[in-house]
Image (cartoon, helix red, strand yellow):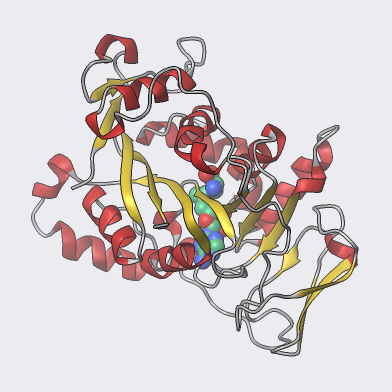
């Protein structure tokens, strides 16, 4: 069983800094800085004993900074960039990507690079499960950062800024490398990653063209946004358009419960991470007292079949799917139904 830290909303972390149960108030930025929270959490757990409160952020030197990470989603062979000399969020419309093995060209749209398998097809279009289609609508995409995401606080999500601070601690070994923000939605974390300057390249990826459109609009509205190190890609999480072993870090915020098949997705995460690469994700979990509900497992499986969403995974199941897909060193931080976990590709 992996170690985990429980966060719940009634107390401040300093009140319980010597136990594995740490409490905090969601969204109360004035109360404390989450960077120090993360340090305290790790310092207070035997499984994090190697992390000292004074540890500086160390950026590894040997991480990849190359932008040559994109691959054909059909054969996973590298694609050749045609048109623009450099890929970035501003140059997608002048760019296309060619796979010389499949003899297929993936065109760039104004807002993103189109790298789904079915891209370019005239008649055919995949019908995805409800949980995926829901976020493809213009209405949901517009609403997402304008109220929808804020509601996650009721499930225990601390909010994007605090989640970002918390995850930086998990990402320490791969800072300076490239990062994929998988299922980025309207790009709230992709934009934070790009602006932080902590990564050599940020890829914001989602299946929803409308979410990517929103991300593009938010970037356009911001003065002096560092566009050169960010690309927007449309792809399916179960068919990632990256060369195997080419990514240093993958983040998936509030997404696993929306993926049609978490195992197919985590297998892809594992394929594209380089040895030592880090996967960090947040989602909802349902365990503890809830595991005593009779027939919870068959009910949750039937719910997943019908809706395409996986809202009822437990911490053990998350650890298990990571292990089954070849990821190790599972650790997590919890707050009510919120969990942030991390797992690593073995070196
Ligand atoms: C709840 S949003 C999370 C957005 C953001 N990462 C966050 O932390 O708020 C879930 C996202 O998963 C995306 N998604 C659902 N199914 C997907 C799939 N098969 N491939 C890629 N993304 C998918 C949706 O389009 C949506 O943007």
Residue 111 drawn above or below residue 238: above
Front residue (pair 101, 61): 61
As drawn, is 71 to the left or to the right of 17?
right
Q: Quadrant of residue 304?
A: bottom left
Front residue (pair 164, 118): 164
Give the residue displayed 66% in from the left and 42% down from the top: 199
Front residue (pair 314, 344): 344
Percent position of residue 225, x then y? 81, 36
Percent position of residue 58, x then y? 55, 32
As drawn, is 109 to the left or to the right of 277?
right
Instruction: Give the number of marks.
Output: 0
Residue 202 drawn above or below residue 5: below
Give the residue displayed 51% in from the left and 73% down from the top: 128
Give the residue displayed 52% in from the left and 39% down from the top: 149
Residue 134 is at least partly visible in this image: no
Front residue (pair 285, 50): 50
As drawn, is 205 to the left or to the right of 41?
right
Which image quarter is the C terminus in? bottom left
Check the image and name the residue furthest to the front: 62
Residue 236 drawn above or below residue 221: below
Percent position of residue 239, x then y? 54, 73
Q: Quadrant of residue 83?
A: bottom right
Percent position of residue 147, x then y? 57, 36
Residue 180 is at least partly visible in this image: yes
Give the residue displayed 50% in from the left and 36% down from the top: 172
């Amino acid at each position: 069983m992996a170690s985990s830290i429980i966060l719940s909303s009634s107390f401040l972390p300093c009140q319980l800094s010597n136990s594995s149960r740490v409490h905090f108030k969601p969204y109360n930025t004035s109360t404390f800085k989450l960077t120090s929270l993360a340090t305290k959490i790790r310092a207070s757990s035997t499984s994090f004993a190697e992390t000292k409160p004074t540890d500086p952020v160390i950026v590894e030197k040997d991480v990849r900074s190359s932008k040559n990470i994109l691959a054909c989603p059909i054969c996973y062979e590298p694609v050749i960039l045609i048109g623009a000399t450099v890929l970035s969020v501003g140059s997608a419309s002048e760019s296309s990507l060619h796979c010389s093995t499949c003899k297929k060209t993936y065109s760039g749209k104004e807002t993103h690079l189109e790298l789904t398998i079915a891209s370019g097809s005239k008649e055919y279009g995949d019908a995805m499960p409800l949980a995926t289609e829901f976020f493809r609508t213009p209405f949901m995409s517009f609403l997402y950062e304008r109220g929808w995401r804020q509601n996650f606080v009721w499930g225990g999500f601390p909010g994007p800024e605090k989640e970002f601070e918390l995850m930086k601690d998990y990402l320490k070994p791969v800072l300076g490398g490239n990062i994929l923000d998988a299922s980025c939605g309207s790009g709230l974390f992709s934009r934070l990653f790009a602006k932080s300057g902590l990564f050599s390249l940020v890829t914001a990826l989602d299946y929803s063209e409308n979410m990517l459109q929103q991300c593009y609009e938010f970037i356009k509205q911001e003065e002096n946004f560092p566009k050169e190190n960010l690309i927007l890609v449309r792809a399916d999480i179960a068919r990632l358009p990256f060369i195997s072993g080419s990514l240093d870090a993958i983040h998936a915020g509030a997404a696993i419960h929306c993926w049609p098949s978490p195992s197919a997705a985590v297998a892809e995460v594992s394929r594209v991470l380089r040895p030592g690469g880090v996967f960090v994700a947040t989602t909802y979990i349902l365990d503890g007292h809830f595991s005593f509900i009779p027939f919870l497992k068959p009910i949750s499986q039937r719910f997943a079949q019908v809706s395409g969403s996986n809202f009822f995974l437990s911490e053990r199941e998350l650890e298990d799917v990571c292990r089954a897909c070849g990821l190790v060193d599972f650790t997590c931080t919890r707050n009510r139904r919120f969990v942030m976990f991390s797992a690593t590709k073995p070196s």
